[in-house]
């Protein structure tokens, strides 16, 4: 237990880390700035010493027992100094022998952190210096905080329960269920704070009772209300008040991790967040933060921001669907016959939306599937506005777009679990949005459908086993970014097996395997359209011959593309790569102007669109009389050809002297 001098030395060393002047520290330890407060609130039974404070920085309280950390923090932040319009402090910290709780005045959030974990949570205390841990805007503040707190809980539970990195399935499944409950109690699936209050009631300060609480809760959530009398044991009314969830989310029996004082507090910290302000799409960033830097690089995992997802799905399918809807919405309805014909066309379009199936063969936490589903539901809402009469009593039945139209393949367990959960949560968010639009509530529970997320290796799996090509409309995603020098021996073998035998690979990027695999899959349905984010190197140098020489010879055509742009995402450790986006199919697809689109993203993120007749594998526009969209500069050991042999219409940006040209028919 901390003694007086231990606390003083801890405070001195702690504040030195944040470059606090020695004189300021000394004055604080002598209670120069907290003397009035300390004399009023000092309790020798629970506190080691009078409180310590530094104006405009931090208010510290040292306690004899970890049990008192959370309740004491509540007392501290109730002080008048924290209630003023402009607080006198940035942080309030209550510290026990092995645990502290910190309150951030600006974000009004609480974190419970073991003293042994302080180093890895350095950024939490940056407000002491006047800085915030991360620069975030109001739209992402809740997302970032949720990301930090849920991954801290996951990591601490795994460490306390001695769960190794490669044996995390059970705890991942447990956290997935906790996330659902946290989201549910803030978004009208459960009663407000129903889960957090029940946890605090049945799990004591030291974490005792957690196993029986979660076992009983998960059983209740998986049992219809009229069958709960058959559970076989009496359950408290607080648990029986929870609704039936279904959908398989709580069906399996799983191991419940042991809780301690610290992890109990961390779950309560999570429960204090405003989960109704958190986007299900941000769960991908939660996964990103749960991985250490080395593992993230090894897996090639890059969480995709909504902005970048829209770069893919808008030209792939969303722009065309919106244009089709606008054309139908503008149809004449001046006569009863014309009005009936318009409704019929809109009904067919509605059926079309409900028939489209989407595959992401590197889905991670499902961000592409989530945003695609959301945008499809929003388009459906526009259709329903024109189709439905004033009586919306059958709104539930009128909604046809469903999460079971969305399929994903993911090699890692944790993101696959999150993808399942996130699709359920996004379905609920969209049900709320549709209900608000029409003034009629749309029921989410019990869950009836689910996205299909397979935890498999996409490069060794037949995609037809996940979604038959005959039923697929679009393929999309952000496959792993691994340059040839970072690819493991096992990944090299997967890559080798995807390409045809004896095909020369050279220094081809790992991401190219998804293009080849997609092209093979699409042979089963040439109507499929695909688009992937990739490293820009697949459209440069010798990799063009390796990848696009193969695909173009099979009949693949590039239908839209984004030239090189810098990657940005919402994860705390931003991926630093230059990437491109390529949309392709076994047929030429033009926009409503009769051209293909080549997008250029400037350094300041401005977007320029070039309309072109064709796009070359080097992502160059083709508008002249000579179609070089199938011309590839081949590797050659022979002397360069004379410049005169090259067509005069080749772009001036190509070198004057090139190896022999390899036309692909």
Image (tube, grey):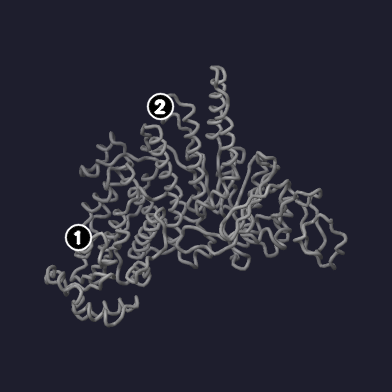
Q: Nearer the viewer, residue 372 or 458?
A: 372
Q: Residue at x 47, y 34 (%)?
A: 381
Q: Quadrant of residue 242?
A: top left
Foreground disc of the pair 2, 1? 1
Q: Nearer the viewer, residue 243 or 113?
A: 113
Q: Nearer the viewer, residue 21 or 216?
A: 21
- List x then y, in percent, for residue 337: 56, 17
> Image check: 610 left or right of 110?
right
> Image check: 640 left or right of 420?
right
Name the residue tied to disc 1.
Answer: 78
Tell me: residue 6, above or below residue 412.
below
Tell me: residue 9, above or below residue 416.
below
Tell me: residue 14, above or below residue 558.
below
Most distant residue in the top direction: 336
Task: Report the number of discs.
Answer: 2
Gap between marks 2 and 1 measured at Cα: 49 Å
- List x then y, in percent, for residue 638: 84, 67
Name the residue tied to disc 2.
Answer: 394
Q: Residue at x 70, y 40 (%)?
A: 594
Q: Nearer the viewer, residue 243 or 53?
A: 53
Under tag 1, what secondary structure?
A: loop
Most distant residue in the front direction: 85
Quarter of the picture containing the N terminus is bottom left
Under tag 2, what secondary structure?
A: loop
Residues at badges 2 and 1 in contact (C-beta under 8 Å)?
no
> Image check: 191 left or right of 634?
left
Q: Quadrant of residue 121?
A: bottom left
- List x then y, in percent, for residue 234: 21, 43
Q: Crowding near pointer 2: few (<14 within 10 Å), some, many (20+)?
A: few
Q: Residue at x 19, y 77 (%)?
A: 32
């Amino acid at each position: 237990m901390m003694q007086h001098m231990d606390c003083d030395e801890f405070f001195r060393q702690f504040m030195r880390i944040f470059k606090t002047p020695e004189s300021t520290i000394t004055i604080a330890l002598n209670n120069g700035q907290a003397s009035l407060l300390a004399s009023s609130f000092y309790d020798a039974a629970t506190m080691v010493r009078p409180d310590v404070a530094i104006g405009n920085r931090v208010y510290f309280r040292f306690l004899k027992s970890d049990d008192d950390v959370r309740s004491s923090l509540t007392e501290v932040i109730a002080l008048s100094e924290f209630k003023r319009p402009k607080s006198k402090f940035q942080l309030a910290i209550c510290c026990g022998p092995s645990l502290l709780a910190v309150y951030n005045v600006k974000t009004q959030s609480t974190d419970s952190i073991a003293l042994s974990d302080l180093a890895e949570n350095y950024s939490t205390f940056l407000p002491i210096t006047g800085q915030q841990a991360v620069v975030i805007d109001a739209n992402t503040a809740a997302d970032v905080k949720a990301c930090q707190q849920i991954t801290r809980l996951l990591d601490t539970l795994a460490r306390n329960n001695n769960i190794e990195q490669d044996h995390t399935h059970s705890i991942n499944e447990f956290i997935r269920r906790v996330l659902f409950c946290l989201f549910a109690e803030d978004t009208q699936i459960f009663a407000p704070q129903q889960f957090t209050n029940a946890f605090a009631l049945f799990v004591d300060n030291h974490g005792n009772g957690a196993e029986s609480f979660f076992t009983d809760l998960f059983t209740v959530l998986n049992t219809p209300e009229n069958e709960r009398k058959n559970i076989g044991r009496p359950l408290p009314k607080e648990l029986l008040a929870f609704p039936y969830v279904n959908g398989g989310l709580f069906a399996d029996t799983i191991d419940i991790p042991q809780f301690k004082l610290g992890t109990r507090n961390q779950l309560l910290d999570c429960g204090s967040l405003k989960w109704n302000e958190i986007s299900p799409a941000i769960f991908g960033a939660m996964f990103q933060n749960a991985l250490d830097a080395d593992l993230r690089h090894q897996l090639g995992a890059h969480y995709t921001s909504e902005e970048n997802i829209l770069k893919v799905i808008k030209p792939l399918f969303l722009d065309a669907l919106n244009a089709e809807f606008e054309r139908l919405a503008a149809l004449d309805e001046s006569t009863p016959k014309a009005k009936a014909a318009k409704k019929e066309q809109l009904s067919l379009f509605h059926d079309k939306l409900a028939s489209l199936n989407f595959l992401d063969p590197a889905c991670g936490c499902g961000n592409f599937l989530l945003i695609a589903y959301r945008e499809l539901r929003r388009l459906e809402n526009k259709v329903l506005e024109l189709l439905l009469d004033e009586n919306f009593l059958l709104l539930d039945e009128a909604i046809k777009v469903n999460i079971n139209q969305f399929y994903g393949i993911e090699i890692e367990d944790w993101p696959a679990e999150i993808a399942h959960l996130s699709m359920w949560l996004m379905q609920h968010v969209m049900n709320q949005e549709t209900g608000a639009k029409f003034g009629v509530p749309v029921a989410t529970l019990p869950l009836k459908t689910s996205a299909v997320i397979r935890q498999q290796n996409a490069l060794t799996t037949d995609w037809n086993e996940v979604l038959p090509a005959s039923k697929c409309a679009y393929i999309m995603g952000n496959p792993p970014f691994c340059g040839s020098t970072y690819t493991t021996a096992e990944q090299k073998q997967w890559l080798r097996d995807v390409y045809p035998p004896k095909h020369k690979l050279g220094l081809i990027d790992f991401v190219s395997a998804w293009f080849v695999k997609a092209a093979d899959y699409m042979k089963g349905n040439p109507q499929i359209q695909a688009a992937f984010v990739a490293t820009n190197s697949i459209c440069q140098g010798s990799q063009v011959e390796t990848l696009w020489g193969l695909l173009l010879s099979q009949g693949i055509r590039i239908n839209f593309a984004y030239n090189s742009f810098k990657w940005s995402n919402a994860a705390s450790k931003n991926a630093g790569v230059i990437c491109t986006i390529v949309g392709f199919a076994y047929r030429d697809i033009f926009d409503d102007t009769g051209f293909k689109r080549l997008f250029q993203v400037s350094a300041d993120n401005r977007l320029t669109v070039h309309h072109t007749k064709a796009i070359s594998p080097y992502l160059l526009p083709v508008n002249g009389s000579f179609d070089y969209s199938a011309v590839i500069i081949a590797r050659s050991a022979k002397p360069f050809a004379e410049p005169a042999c090259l067509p005069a219409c080749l772009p001036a940006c190509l070198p004057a002297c090139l190896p022999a040209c390899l036309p692909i028919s």
